[in-house]
Image: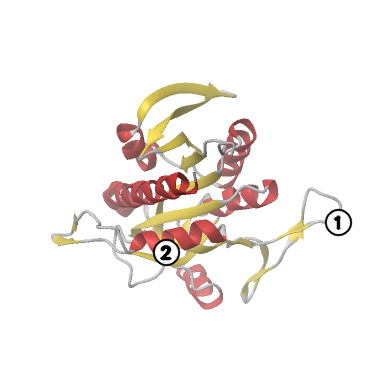
């Protein structure tokens, strides 16, 4: 029986802090640039990976994801990083496995808030959605991997605890801070757990190009109009928590690939 081609995971984070742990633990590292964007290839938990920073926002996320998917032809794309906490039950460092990633600014803004709708796509007759779901196989693996994951404790505001990992909904747009009215509208219409700025665009790219994807985001600051100070205080904790979970998932992914062989 011929051998299967060796799998490759594209691992994306919006900020350098979101991929720092990956780069520290990768072996056989080799750096490069693609259209001027730096990246690092190597092995992580038994899996071949290429990791890159997208920058912040939907355009940066879509641009870098498209370039790297086209150049490296990855088996799957994983987004790992942080998001503000819309779900009041989430603590800093709790990680969401996104079961639905939503463009929360796609549609029409009315006096009654957002009306979400599909928009014209790049192909003739095509409409593109305002939300995207992860690859079913990757989602099943993530749900299973939670059972074997032991989170490293974090300390926030004098309290030490083990962050949780659970399925949920992630909303994204170019809004860093949002008003109380927007928060209420989001909760009423979408019931998201986290809000961030890249994953919906990356998910749309993956859906358009036919590449499996999954999104992992850990909660940082609560969602608010002016999150800068709280994000700076909690962002590193959240980025590291998401990265530790993502590395566990990648190890499970690699183990499954070896079983297939």
Label 2: state its secondary structure.
helix
Quick one: which residue is furthest to the right in this view? 124
Residue 98, numbered circle: none
Position of 125 compared to 138: left or right?
right
Q: Residue 148: in sight, yes or no?
A: yes
| Labels 2 and 1 touching (C-beta < 8 A) | no
Of 183 and 117, the residue lying toward us? 117
- If you read the primary sequence from the N terminus, does the residue marked by circle 2 or circle 1 appear first? 1
Q: How dense is the environment of label 2, judged by Cα within 10 Å: few (below 14), some, or many (20 and up)?
A: some
Position of 130 compared to 185: left or right?
right
Give the percent coordinates (x, y) of residue 203. Answer: 59, 52
Of 234 and 256, the residue lying toward us? 256
Q: Quadrant of residue 120?
A: bottom right
Label 1: state its secondary structure.
loop
Residue 143, numbered circle: 2
- 74 up-or-down from 203: above or below: above
Position of 251 compared to 67: left or right?
left
**For the point 45% across and 70% down, which residue is it?**
180
Image quadrant containing the N terminus: top right
Give the percent coordinates (x, y) of residue 123. Answer: 81, 49
Q: Which residue is mark 1?
A: 125
Position of 123 compared to 260: left or right?
right
Distance from disc 2 to disc 1, alpha carbons, whole Å, reads 36 Å
Q: How dense is the environment of label 1, judged by Cα within 10 Å: few (below 14), some, or many (20 and up)?
A: few
- 128 up-or-down from 49: above or below: below
Give the percent coordinates (x, y) of residue 9. Answer: 50, 40
**For the point 38% across and 43% down, which residue is it?**
18
């Amino acid at each position: 029986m011929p051998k299967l081609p060796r799998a490759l995971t594209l691992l994306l984070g919006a900020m350098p802090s979101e991929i720092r742990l990956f780069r520290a633990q990768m072996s056989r590292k080799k750096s490069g640039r693609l259209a001027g964007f730096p990246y690092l290839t190597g092995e992580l938990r038994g899996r071949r990976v290429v990791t890159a920073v997208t920058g912040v926002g939907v355009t940066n996320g879509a641009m870098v994801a498209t370039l790297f998917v086209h150049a490296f032809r990855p088996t799957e794309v994983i987004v790992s990083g942080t998001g503000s906490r819309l779900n009041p039950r989430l603590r800093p460092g709790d990680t969401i496995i996104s079961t639905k990633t939503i463009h929360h600014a796609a549609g029409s803004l009315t006096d009654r808030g957002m009306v979400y709708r599909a928009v014209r796509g790049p192909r003739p007759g095509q409409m593109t959605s305002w939300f995207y779901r992860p690859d079913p196989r990757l989602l099943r693996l993530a749900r299973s991997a939670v059972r074997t994951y032991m989170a490293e404790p974090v300390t926030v505001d004098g309290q030490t605890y083990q962050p949780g990992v659970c399925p949920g909904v992630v909303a994204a747009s170019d809004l860093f801070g949002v008003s109380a009215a927007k928060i209420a509208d989001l909760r009423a219409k979408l019931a998201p757990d986290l809000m961030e700025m890249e994953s919906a665009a990356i998910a749309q790219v993956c859906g358009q190009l036919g590449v499996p994807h999954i999104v992992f985001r850990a909660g940082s600051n609560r969602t608010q109009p002016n999150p800068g100070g709280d994000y700076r205080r909690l962002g590193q904790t959240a980025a590291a928590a998401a990265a530790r979970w993502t590395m566990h998932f990648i190890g499970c992914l690699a183990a499954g690939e070896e079983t297939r062989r």
